[in-house]
Image (spheres, rainbow, N blue to C red):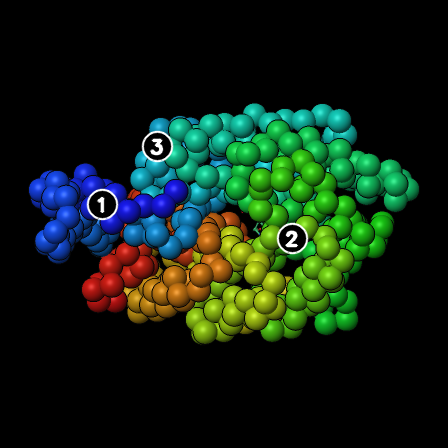
């Protein structure tokens, strides 16, 4: 349809941009130039997120990434301080242990979904997401999985993943499909665990393929620790490249980042950068972040010797300089996570210091690795990542 000049003028008049008279004239004089359209109202800028101890983590990081925490279902269904903190601060939750096979299916063909279901219900009631952890982890694999022929083992794994990932299809935004499958030693690429001993690395393919089939909406992650160390990271990248080259469905990399106070933040952030450099467009989740207040030598983790002596059972037993160092490291890391678009989720491995697994690993001693103290009060580490003006 061809529009005449008159049609166009009528259209502008209808917009109120022109006096109607300009459309009425039959000809003759050139119509006056249309008045400029009134500028559309400019919406006010969103208020800046609050900062400091009045801020909530999910407010501060709302436009950056999911901010999550590992929880035990009892912590968020008991109405206590943990539930209050969970509801206020986190947009994502990871089951600390109740979504693992040793809890869900301790014997073949039996399933106990109650704790995991309750966590899903809690998250959904609070507008939060759930990170699934973990469909396969050698440390929580009941023995029945890895006995029998390769075909038997594959059937059991595919059945289990189909049941679990299928049950939560659409409700879990990301799964740690396999956890800690990379060797810690330089002699092997793959961890020489029961799975690998039974069927070689094929189980990793089977797990990812079964997870994609069970829940096409979930992002599928390979998750591991010590990716901040080049050797472990290099072996992980070998595994990742192999999976990608063979078209195995993989969407992202989970970095546990269980850190010691003395580590250089740039060494940690290099792990994110090196995965980005693969150019595969992989999402990256920080999945289990905590920063021990101790700075132990390697033999402490390897065999529990030469570990630093515990500071004491009261948070005030820890020197202020230690908390300052921890807070600065948290600030540097979160600044780095915010600067990297591939980081789409950052989860702490717990809410309050008193619940951390690090109170029992690598030795039993009080640790203070998280953002909230045993009473649930925000620490300097919390203020350091929520308030850029906070002086550490
Ligand atoms: O709550 C029960 C208690 O009622 C029972 O009496 C007791 C004895 O059976 O068990 C308690 O549950 C324990 C649970 O931790 C809570 O303390 C489980 O047995 C125990 O297996 C579980 O350990 C978890 C571990 O993974 C194994 O699933 C830890 O909480 C959890 O922090 C740890 O998390 C792992 C990540 O999944 C992977 N990365 C390393 C990280 C630390 O090991």
Q: Residue at x 18, y 48 (%)?
A: 40
Nearer-the-camera pick, 386 or 96: 386
Task: Give the CA separation, mark 2 to mark 1.
Answer: 59 Å
Q: Residue at x 37, y 68 (%)?
A: 332
Badge number at residue 6: 1
**Mark 3 surroundings within 10 Å by alpha-carbon count, few (fewer than 14), some (14 through 19), many (20 or more):** few
Of labels 3 and 1, earlier in sequence is 1
Please give the residue where the numbered disc 2 appears in the rendered image: 250
Badge number at residue 244: none
Task: Give the CA separation, mark 2 to mark 3.
Answer: 38 Å
Please provide percent x and percent y for residue 126.
38, 33
Q: Is residue 82 visible?
A: no
Task: Give the CA separation, mark 3 to mark 1.
Answer: 71 Å
Of labels 2 and 1, earlier in sequence is 1
Q: Is residue 32 above or below residue 355?
A: below
**Mark 1 surroundings within 10 Å by alpha-carbon count, few (fewer than 14), some (14 through 19), many (20 or more):** some
Q: Residue at x 52, y 66 (%)?
A: 272
Badge number at residue 80: 3
Image-quadrant location for residue 363: bottom right
Instruction: Choose mark 2 or mark 1, whichever is in front.
Output: 1
């Amino acid at each position: 349809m061809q529009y005449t000049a008159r049609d166009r003028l009528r259209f502008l008049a209808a917009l109120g941009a022109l006096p109607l008279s300009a459309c009425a004239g039959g000809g003759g004089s050139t119509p006056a130039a249309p008045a400029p359209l009134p500028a559309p109202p400019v919406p006010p800028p969103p208020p800046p997120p609050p900062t400091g101890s009045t801020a909530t983590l999910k407010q501060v990081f709302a436009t950056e990434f999911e901010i999550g925490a590992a929880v035990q279902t009892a912590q968020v269904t008991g109405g206590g301080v943990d539930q209050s903190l969970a509801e206020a601060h986190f947009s994502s939750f990871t089951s600390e242990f109740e979504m693992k096979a040793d809890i869900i299916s301790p014997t073949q063909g039996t399933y106990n979904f109650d704790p995991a279901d309750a966590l899903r219900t809690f998250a959904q009631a609070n507008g939060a997401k759930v990170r699934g952890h973990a469909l396969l982890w050698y440390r929580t694999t009941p023995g029945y999985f890895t006995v029998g022929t390769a075909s038997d083992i594959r059937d059991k794994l595919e059945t289990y993943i189909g049941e679990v990932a299928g049950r939560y299809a659409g409700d879990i935004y990301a799964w740690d499909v396999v956890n800690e499958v990379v060797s810690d030693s330089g002699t092997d690429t793959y961890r020489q665990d029961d799975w690998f001993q039974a069927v070689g690395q094929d189980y990793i393919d089977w797990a990812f393929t079964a997870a994609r089939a069970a829940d096409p909406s979930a992002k599928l992650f390979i998750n591991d620790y010590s990716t901040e160390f080049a050797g472990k990271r290099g072996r992980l990248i070998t595994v990742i490249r192999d999976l990608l080259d063979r078209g195995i469905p993989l969407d992202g990399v989970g970095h546990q980042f269980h850190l010691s106070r003395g580590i250089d933040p740039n060494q940690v952030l290099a792990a994110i950068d090196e995965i980005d450099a693969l150019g595969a467009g992989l999402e990256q989740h920080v999945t289990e972040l905590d920063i021990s207040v101790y700075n132990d030598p390697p033999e402490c983790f390897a065999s529990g010797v030469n570990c630093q002596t515990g500071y004491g059972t009261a948070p005030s037993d820890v020197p202020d300089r230690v908390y300052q160092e921890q807070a600065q490291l948290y600030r540097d890391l979160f600044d780095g996570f915010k600067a990297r678009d591939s980081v789409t989720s950052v989860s702490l491995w717990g809410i309050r210091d008193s619940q951390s697994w690090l109170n029992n690993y690598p030795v039993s001693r009080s640790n203070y690795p998280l953002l909230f103290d045993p009473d649930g009060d925000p620490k300097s580490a919390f203020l350091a990542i929520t308030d850029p003006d906070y002086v550490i």
